Image: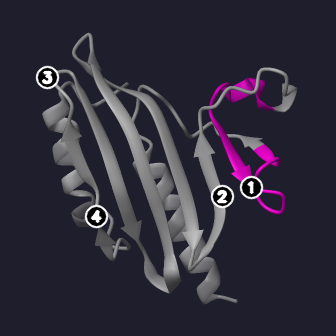
Amino acid sequence: MNPFQSLREYEEFVYTLRERFPAIERSTLVVIPRGKRVAVVQGELAFAKGYRITIKERLSLDADLVVIESYGYELWHNADKIAWYDTQPHPDDPDLQSTHPHHKHVLPDIKHNRAPAPEMSFTQPNLAALIQEMETLVRSEKTQ
């Protein structure tokens, strides 16, 4: 269930991410209201070892719940894009139907290589799952 019943609550969530996730070294995320019931979240979260996530979400307040209308999340390591999540429908790809339209573009052919993204949602925040994914990448690099 979506824990956010107002754009203000979601805004507080975004601005306190660093307090809950110490692995975040820097955040440039901003919530930009676009009216009483719509906002855009955009910016970047930076982590150790050159890892970062760029984030763009369009939010709306629907029936007293915050809904993510659309999103784009890019995972970077230094200057290399290593994955991205989006909601561009691919109805002809049977491998993606289990999480339609949520999916992740992955290496080696990042533009065409897609995987289901069960951790993504329109009705729950996605940022915690993305941060946990990045924390795993940072930890795995330390052991290499």
Q: CA distance from mark 1 to mark 2?
A: 5 Å
Q: Tag 4 or tag 1, which sits nearer the N-term?
A: 4
Mark whose residue sits in front, 3 or 2: 3
Q: Which residue is mark 1?
A: 106
Q: CB of mark 1 within 8 Å of CB of mark 4? A: no
In the picture, the quarter occupied by the C terminus is bottom right
Q: CA distance from mark 3 to mark 1?
A: 36 Å
> Is 139 placed above or below 96 here?
below
Which amino acid type is marked by label 3?
Lys
Q: CB of mark 1 within 8 Å of CB of mark 2? A: yes
Q: Is residue 15 left or right of residue 46?
A: left
Which amino acid type is marked by label 4?
Thr
Q: Which residue is mark 3?
A: 36
Q: Which residues are magenta?
A: 96-114
In the picture, the quarter occupied by the N terminus is top left
Judge whether residue 127 is colored magenta: no
Q: Which residue is mark 4?
A: 28
Q: CA distance from mark 3 to mark 2?
A: 33 Å
Q: Which residue is mark 2?
A: 83
Q: Tag 1 or tag 3, which sits nearer the N-term?
A: 3
